[in-house]
Amino acid sequence: FTYYLDWMSDSLRSKVVAWQTAVNAERDPYYNLNLGYFTKMTEVSDLQMEIDKLDTQIKMYGRCRDNIVAESSTDLVASYNEVIAENGGEQITIQNSVGATLAEIDNLIAEQESNKENTKVRLEAKQLELESIRAQISAVNERLKITSYFTESEYTVILNGLVPAQTYSI
């Protein structure tokens, strides 16, 4: 608005300068809030992906367990281990007996379910942090929106001065 300040009334000019000063004062903090927001979004996404991988591992352990029980054999463990490994899980070691292998799988399932619950707690904490940052960004937006600084008629004068021959309302 600097170019247009000369044609404005003193009161409108003062309001424009006050608004520009407020916007400039919030520029760096606002930028940092947005960087923090996107960083938290990435962290939330990473935690959700971790939960998805844990879910896949738990399902594969469970399916492998079910298959071993149904077949009384550990023959298909290797094929399940491939999917488990692709998803970052600990591979199943075939033990000396079917029962011992099933016990190992039960332990792996319990471990991954515990990891999943811990990851969910971390996810919820990150989501709260994300909401807090979002609220701060919204508060800055609300505080600095141009219509908060100007009356409808002042806002119309500003817009008509910037784009003559058009009428605006808020």
Image (tube, rainbow, N blue to C red):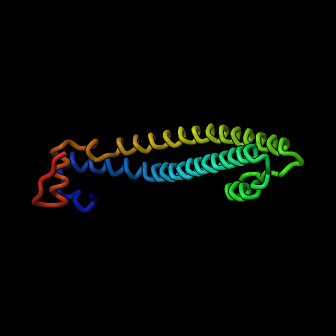
Q: Residue at x 84, y 51 (%)?
A: 94
Q: Is residue 154 left or right of residue 59?
A: left
Quarter of the C terminus within the rendering: top left
Q: Position of residue 48 (x, y in %)?
A: 58, 47
Above-or-below relation of 75 to 142: below
Q: Residue at x 67, y 55 (%)?
A: 87
In depth, the one of 81 and 156 nearer the eye is: 81
Q: Is residue 122 left or right of residue 26?
A: right
Quarter of the N terminus within the rendering: bottom left
In depth, the one of 82 and 6 nearer the eye is: 82
Furthest residue in direction front, as rendered: 71
Corner quadrant of residue 58 = top right
Q: Position of residue 27 (x, y in %)?
A: 43, 52
Q: Position of residue 110 (x, y in %)?
A: 74, 38
In depth, the one of 134 and 159 nearer the eye is: 134
Q: Is residue 120 left or right of residue 21?
A: right
Furthest residue in direction left, as rendered: 165
Q: Is residue 121 left or right of residue 97?
A: left
Corner quadrant of residue 77 = bottom right
Q: Position of residue 54 (x, y in %)?
A: 66, 47
Furthest residue in direction right, as rendered: 96
In depth, the one of 11 and 124 nearer the eye is: 124
The count of marks equals: 0
